[in-house]
Amino acid sequence: MQPGKAPVRKRVASKRPQARVTKPSRAAPRVASGATPVRAKPLALGDLSQLLGYSIRRAQLWIFKEFSRQLAAFEMSPAQFSVLCVIDANPGVNQLAVAQLLSIERAGLGRLVDHLEGRGLVRRTASAINRRYYVLYLTETGTALLGRLRPAAAASDKALAAKIGPRAYKELRQALSIFVGDA
Amino acid sequence: MQPGKAPVRKRVASKRPQARVTKPSRAAPRVASGATPVRAKPLALGDLSQLLGYSIRRAQLWIFKEFSRQLAAFEMSPAQFSVLCVIDANPGVNQLAVAQLLSIERAGLGRLVDHLEGRGLVRRTASAINRRYYVLYLTETGTALLGRLRPAAAASDKALAAKIGPRAYKELRQALSIFVGDA
DNA sequence: TATTGTTATACTCTATAACTATA
DNA sequence: TATAGTTATAGAGTATAACAATA
């Protein structure tokens, strides 16, 4: 809530179970059955399990984890990879066009391109025809790295296909394609 | 990069197109065809369009936006809603169990429950049988609010179904169900 | 006056480690 | 020694507004 650095961090109610003086049923007699789990019955997700939106959220978390695992050696986030792909497919594109295509805020994209430029993967050039523009290209280093990233990204997508099955993979590709290029 | 508040923010390369003295082809003659767009051809996503992982990411962003739109009146994030659902479905559950079921870090969940408790939606009680545990229940306010959130959440899922079509909706529910309850 | 890009700021998430109380 | 929960901290991502340069 408060942005300040005050370390107090008020709490609304009682903080934690916290050493009640009257220990109620001390030495609770091992809870009858199992030792470790207080609750043996499996937990339910409730209505959540009926919402496709929640499944997609969990699937997306799984995919980002898998992607990061496959591309760990390259220190490359999914977002950075997506920007490299777009610049590679559209040499000379400007930043705002990339931001709109990927639904990223231009301010955030600017910092992302900063980083890619700092790594020597992307070259920023002043446009000859419109001096408000940057014109973006992959460097040779960037092209070479993307050549190595592609198989890794494909591998993470194959892992996804293996997880859900090839038929579902094809169906999903078809069904979800309407979200790319969209808002 | 640097966490400090220093406003310098070094840049690796040339900052922006920035007023070159030799203006190259000033008054570029309206670029032949269209006035506004320098690049008329539509941008390509490159290899990105072949990756189901990217489609799922975009679909998930769309869903969160739709969910936030439907539940804007309640000031309720998807994560907060998911926690309310789980507590409602498992009265007396402890925090760690919720965190594991939803794949949320327990530290983050603690703060989230702080917030829900502060709003009077969740009650934390010391467990009688294990004093390390919190035992979580919805308050009456929380139950009542959840009763109003459910239709809104269902509406956002219906919007998703309308977007992708009822057949794809059913297929996806089946195909992606393996991700819930999973890591 | 509108647009591209930058800067600054703030807020949310996430991830981690260290700590307390308890088992 | 291990576990539930808290605290602190740092990093990423996101959203916004304001600004400069250019159109």
Image: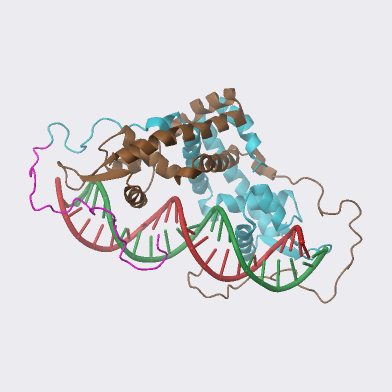
Chain colours: A cyan, B brown, C red, D green
The correct choice, above or below, for A5 with respect to B79 in the image is below
Whether residue B2 is visible: yes
| Relative image position of residue B88 (x, y in whole percent) | 33, 35
Find the magenta span and give its range: A1-30
| Relative image position of residue A175 (x, y in whole percent) | 61, 30
**Does A52 lie within the magenta span?**
no
Instruction: Identify the residue at horizontal 13%, vertical 35% (top origin).
Output: A31
| Relative image position of residue B36 (x, y in whole percent) | 82, 54
Whether residue B181 is visible: no
Left or right for A91, reference A175: right
Left or right for B22, reference A61: right
Q: In the image shown, does B41 or A170 lie closer to the viewer?
A: B41
Left or right for A114, reference A159: right
Q: Quadrant of residue A105?
A: bottom right
Quadrant position of the C terminus of chain B in the picture: top left
Provide the major secondary structure of the magenta segment.
Answer: loop
Q: In the image shown, does B132 or D11 lie closer to the viewer?
A: B132
| Relative image position of residue B46 (x, y in whole percent) | 70, 44
Instruction: Identify the residue at horizontal 35%, vertical 52% (top origin).
Output: B111
**Does A4 lie within the magenta span?**
yes
Instruction: Identify the residue at horizontal 66%, vertical 57% (top origin).
Output: A142
Q: Please identify the residue farthest to the top as the structure is shown.
A: B167
